[in-house]
């Protein structure tokens, strides 16, 4: 009996996102060895079909790793500082690779030098991810622990607004890179507003991109349009569109609000803790959550930079070896070098044009094509026909009624309209324009430190995360009621 059969009746955690295997393999490969920990994941399954991925991990793996993280922190608070110091050292090395690759002309490297640079860059980003991937099991475990402990605490103290307390305790204490990027846009918009010459260049993107501040901004955030599904350059046209939306607004007020949000969050948390006197274990989880929220944002930068430069390599591999770039995306990144050298990309890609599965364990990866459907039905498929009401966790309080739009990736963005309810597996930075237009946000997945949670709190949009099956139950055009105060989503007949 194989591992999948052994674990098939266990409780699984599932994420559904738009992703290409070659990019998603960064997260998968890192789970094969979590560098700071003794406990490891026994099994990870990734089902792929088209541009969609079902990411499956065992709840018992998450709980075991979460417990080790908490115990290490409670035993020695300096453990966290040591962990972050190691990560920052690896991050600096990785950033140097990123700069080198962006500046390089890959077409001028010989085959061995090209593949060697690819290997070194991969090992660098992987070494970071093998540390910061512990964010995921911590987040999943922290939610369950905090909700159970807070429910008992609030019941004992006669406190009724547990969801609000939970939301404040786990609010991040540092600005996200999206917030930093937005502040950069505001500052450029302010200069445009005050300069007729700069304003005239908004209709000439190529010239506009040569302005020093603009050039620096585009260089700093070149990777922010990337996603697990693919890479797209953040361009002058993108920046100009963002600036035009701001020109008739009070830029000082917007910047002040954004810059003050983090300080206000810290103050609210401090006041809440002084008011209620929470138990030490609740405070420990809140402290860890604040740190891991920040680390998750930093690792998101790493991942998007990886997707950006990996796409550069894929384009060069495609050109040089006469291979379809979409075929190259169907593989775990560790498979590509061997397949290129043995000229087997096209042959192997044909086997992965339908549903296929990659199984990851600590000592191997294994690909299933013929048996993928059997295992998909065994692990993933669920009957949701009669479900009318969904429950999740409140990431940002509030209520809303609107039309549901189920979105997995950028190809579906055009169907989303102002005031719709965004329903998705999990949000990512490229979802930001949709989230700004959304009346409410509902996700299958994501934890208290996820992108949807951070964004919705910052913009005060009702948000429910962790429903697990929202994209299976809700359909495009459904009228839904979102009660984020209670974590409930209801379809209105």
Image (cartoon, rainbow, N blue to C red):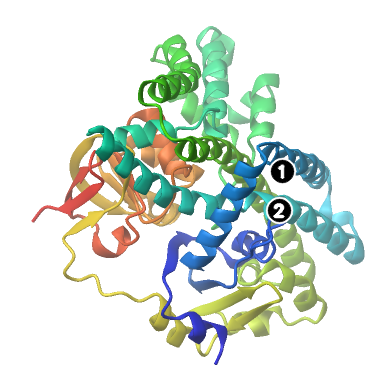
Q: Quadrant of residue 431?
A: top left
87 w.r.t. 18: above or below = above
Q: Nearer the viewer, residue 131 or 286?
A: 286
Please tell me whether residue 91 is drawn above or below residue 247 in the rendered image.
below
Q: Which residue is mark 2?
A: 36
Which residue occupies the foreground of this view, 249 or 320? 249
In this view, the residue farthest toward the bottom is 1
Q: Is residue 233 visible?
A: no
Q: Using the image as rendered, state which of residue 478 and residue 414 is in the foreground.
A: 478
Q: Position of residue 365 (x, y in %)?
A: 66, 77
Query: How far across and how far down the image is residue 454, in percent?
Result: 44, 36
Q: Are the residues tagged 2 and 1 within 8 Å (C-beta)?
A: yes
Mark 2 or mark 1: name the one nearer the start of the chain.
Answer: 2
Q: Residue furthest left?
A: 493
Which corner quadrant holds the N terminus?
A: bottom right
Residue 479 image offset from top left, x and y in percent: 16, 51
* 491 with respect to 333 (left or right): left
Residue, x 17% and y 52% (percent of image)?
A: 490
Q: Eyeballing the image, is 430 above or below 476?
A: above
| x and y, in percent, of residue 205 in the image | 59, 29
Circle number at residue 83: 1
């Amino acid at each position: 009996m194989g591992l999948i059969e052994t674990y098939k009746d266990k409780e699984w955690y599932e994420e559904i996102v738009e992703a290409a295997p070659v990019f998603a393999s960064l997260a998968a490969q890192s789970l094969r060895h979590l560098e700071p920990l003794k406990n490891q994941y026994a099994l990870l399954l990734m089902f792929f079909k088209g541009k969609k991925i079902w990411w499956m991990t065992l709840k018992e793996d998450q709980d075991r790793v979460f417990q080790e993280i908490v115990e290490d922190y409670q035993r020695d608070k300096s453990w966290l500082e040591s962990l972050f110091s190691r990560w920052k050292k690896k991050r600096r090395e990785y950033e140097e690779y990123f700069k080198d690759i962006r500046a390089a002309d890959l077409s001028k490297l010989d085959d061995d030098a090209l593949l060697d640079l690819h290997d070194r860059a991969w090992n660098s980003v992987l070494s970071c991810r093998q540390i910061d991937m512990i964010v995921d099991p911590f987040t999943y475990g922290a939610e369950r622990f905090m909700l159970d402990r807070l429910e008992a605490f609030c019941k004992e103290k006669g406190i009724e607004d547990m969801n609000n307390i939970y939301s404040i305790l786990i609010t991040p204490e540092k600005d996200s890179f999206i917030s930093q990027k937005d502040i950069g846009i505001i500052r450029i918009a302010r200069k445009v507003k005050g300069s007729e010459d700069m304003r005239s260049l908004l209709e000439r993107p190529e010239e506009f991109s040569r302005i020093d501040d603009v050039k620096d901004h585009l260089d700093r955030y070149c990777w922010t349009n990337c996603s697990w599904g693919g890479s797209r350059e953040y361009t002058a046209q993108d920046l100009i569109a963002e600036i035009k939306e701001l020109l008739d607004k009070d830029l000082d007020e917007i910047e002040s609000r954004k810059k003050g949000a983090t300080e206000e969050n810290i103050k609210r948390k401090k006041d809440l803790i002084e008011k209620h006197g929470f138990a030490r274990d609740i405070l420990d989880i809140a402290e860890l959550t604040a740190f891991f929220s920040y680390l998750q944002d930093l690792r998101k930068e790493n991942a998007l930079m990886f997707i950006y430069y990996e796409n550069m390599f894929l384009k060069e591999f495609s050109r040089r070896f006469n291979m379809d770039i979409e075929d190259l995306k169907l593989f775990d990144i560790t498979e590509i070098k061997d397949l290129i050298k043995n000229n087997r990309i096209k042959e192997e890609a044909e086997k992965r044009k339908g549903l296929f599965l990659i199984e990851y364990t600590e000592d191997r990866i294994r690909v299933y094509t013929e048996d993928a459907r059997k295992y998909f039905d065994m692990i993933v498929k669920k009957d949701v026909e009669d479900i009318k009401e969904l429950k999740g966790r409140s990431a940002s309080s509030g209520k809303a009624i609107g039309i549901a739009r189920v979105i997995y990736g950028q190809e579906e963005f055009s169907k989303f309209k102002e005031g719709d309810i965004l329903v998705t597996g999990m949000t990512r930075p490229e979802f930001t324009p949709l989230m700004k237009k959304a009346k409410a946000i509902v996700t299958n997945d994501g934890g208290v430190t996820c992108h949807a949670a951070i964004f919705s709190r910052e913009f005060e949009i009702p948000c429910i995360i962790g429903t697990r099956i929202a994209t299976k139950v809700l359909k495009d055009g459904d009228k839904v009621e979102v009660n984020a105060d209670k974590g409930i989503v209801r379809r209105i007949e």
